[in-house]
Image: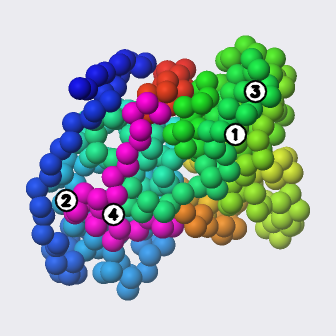
Amino acid sequence: MSSSAHVGTTAYTDTPLKRTFPTVAMPALAYTPLVAEETAAAYEKVRHIIPAIEWPAYAPYVKAINDLKKERNAVILAHNYMTPEIYHGVADIVGDSLQLAKEAARSTADVIVQCGVHFMAETSKILNPDKTILMPDMGAGCSLAESITAADVRGLREKHPGVPIVTYVNTSAEVKAECDICCTSSNALQIVESLGAPRVLLIPDKYLAANVALHTDVEILTWEGACVVHQRFTGAEMREYRESVPGVKIVAHPECPTDVTEEADYTGSTSGMITWVKQNKPEKVLLVTECSMADNIAVETPGVDYVRPCNLCPYMKMITLPKILESLLHMRDEVVVDPVVAQRARTAVERMINLQS
């Protein structure tokens, strides 16, 4: 027998409705004049990144995915680190993890295709228990999410009784379920200070925690997790860029080590970095984050010269147009979260979202 409970503002059903979707034939995927015409607007956005000779390989997938979204009543959420042909070609909603979490909660689609990494798809499922959440490649994980387990969090509670636990959204559903509230890089400081506690555990990213600690009187305790992309940057590297590229502005993500953020002109989430560049329009800018983001926002910031220290996320790059099409076509790679875990994790995620509302 099914039952339901209310967590936050949305009903959670522990036995979600299982939808059936009609079988759809594989499209021809030929680069025809019609395909060229219907994808011309998308190519115009990415022509500075994708050579004209390569577009015919992407365009049939772009058209097929966009057509199939309508049939499936599907929406594609794409993180800022997706490749340009995904970000500008098929995505309906783009943004950082907080923006995508909010949009997942608001979505009226039957199907959500998460173009990012696995924890993001889990978050979408947590917020949309009755929707079908597809992950084009189940192997697209995250070094931060893999650095900590639910058992580790329970151990931290035993070691630090009474200390609130804030978990970065870059964690599994099981870890979120053990915590008090979630945060993203854009709201971590606000979340920490909202708790009114003298000491807070901010897990699992040690660099995000260290950067938050620079701006608050709250004692920050953390875990030894780090992002495989951002931890590779160094302060010495930033100084070398300043010497070799006169006038360059450095914009860093708070998952970077503190010696990097101390060299930066601005430090913020991916959405914050984008906003800073749009508002300040620097002549030359170094985005200290996953390098696809520079490709994506260059479309919206003409006149800005991007210096690219190209650190790629191996997990994000596992998501491709062919995998998106296969996932939507066959309705496979569906993300499922244990209902009990999801209900508890949802409390932590919705506390974050409600605080931001």
Query: Looking at the rendered structure, which numbered label has been put on residue 68?
Result: 2
In this rendering, the answer to whether 180 lies above or below 332 is above
Does 258 appear in magenta? Answer: no
- Give the residue at x 66% y 67%: 311
Query: Looking at the rendered structure, which numbered label has been put on residue 116?
Result: none
Q: Secondary structure at mark 4?
A: helix
Earlier-in-chain disc, 4 versus 2:
2
Q: Residues within 10 Å of mark 1 (few under 14, many from 20)?
A: some
Q: Quadrant of residue 320?
A: bottom left
Q: Secondary structure at mark 1?
A: helix
- Expressed as whole percent of the image width and height from the top left, the position of residue 298 reads 53, 60
Q: CA distance from mark 4 to mark 3?
A: 42 Å
Dot 4 and dot 3 residues touching (CB under 8 Å): no
Query: Looking at the rendered structure, which numbered label has been put on residue 158?
Result: 3
Q: Nearer the viewer, mark 4 or mark 1?
A: 1
Earlier-in-chain disc, 1 versus 2:
2
Q: Secondary structure at mark 2?
A: helix
Q: CA distance from mark 3 to mark 1?
A: 10 Å
Magenta stretch: give its range: 317-341
Task: Check disc 3 and give the amino acid type.
Answer: Glu
Earlier-in-chain disc, 3 versus 2:
2
- Expressed as whole percent of the image width and height from the top left, the position of residue 218 reads 81, 23
Does residue 91 show up? no
In this rendering, the answer to whether 124 lies above or below 34 is above
The residue that label 4 is drawn on is 324
Q: CA distance from mark 1 to mark 2?
A: 42 Å
Earlier-in-chain disc, 3 versus 1:
1
Dot 4 and dot 2 residues touching (CB under 8 Å): no
Query: Looking at the rendered structure, which numbered label has been put on residue 152?
Result: 1
In this rendering, the answer to whether 9 lies above or below 134 is above
Q: Nearer the viewer, mark 3 or mark 2?
A: 3
- Expressed as whole percent of the image width and height from the top left, the position of residue 165 reads 68, 27
